[in-house]
Image (tube, grey):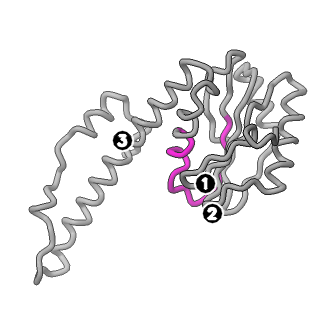
Amino acid sequence: MNPSFLSRADLVRELLAPPVLDFLDTAPHVGDTEAGYHGVAANDSALTHKLDVARELLLRDLQAQMCTGPVMHSPQALRDWLRLHCANLEHEVFLVLYLTAQHQLIEAVEMFRGTLTQTSVYPRELVKGAIARNASAVVIAHNHPSGHAEPSRADEFLTQTLKTALSLVDVRVLDHLIVAGDTVLSFAERGLI
């Protein structure tokens, strides 16, 4: 079951529920046949489910923090949310955080999904999204599954292209963030915006 479809109460219930299998009862022993190892796999599945539920709760709490005040006033919440959102992705994603005039989060959208090394981004879609949400500003982000956070020339060119396109409809690009593992690189901090 996908945790993103559960209510907060259901997520907490899932997280706090006792495990279905007890690892001590299902741990493999010397001399066990191959069938004896199936309990371990089931336990791994139960643990993975609990971790997915915990991750979903954290994502929602961090997103709620970004909705209560200016996103850039709590950059750590934004960075933590991005790290969690992009954790373990083996493909690039391009995210847009649409913001109000007070820079509060309206909506975070995964706009484009790519391959291991690239994502096609269409400025027109960001402009349409900003107008549809009546956004005043955006923060854009994408991940580098390679684990290398340094921006490419294409990343820098894309940032300028998006900045120009969005400025035509009075929407500011506040930052472009690159997520690579535990590292989140900010174009604004580097003076690239």
Please tell me how crowded label 1 is: few (under 14), some (14-19), or many (20+) other residues with Cα within 10 Å.
many
Question: What are the residue bounds of the magenta stretch?
Answer: 81-96
Q: Where, by quadrant of the figure, is residue 70 drawn?
A: top right
- How packed mark 3 is, by other alpha carbons closer than 10 Å (few <14, some 14-19, many 20 or more), is some
Report the label total: 3
Where is 165 relative to 158, above or below? above
Seen at 57% across and 27% down, the residue is 74
Q: How much space separates mark 2 and mark 1, taking CA atoms?
A: 7 Å
Residue lying furthest top: 102
Residue receiving disc 2:
146
Q: Amino acid at mark 1?
A: Ala
Q: Is residue 10 magenta?
A: no
For image coordinates 67% across by 48% down, the residue present is 178
Q: Is residue 65 left or right of residue 178?
A: left
- Residue at which label 1 appears: 180
Q: Are marks 2 and 1 in contact (CB under 8 Å)?
A: yes
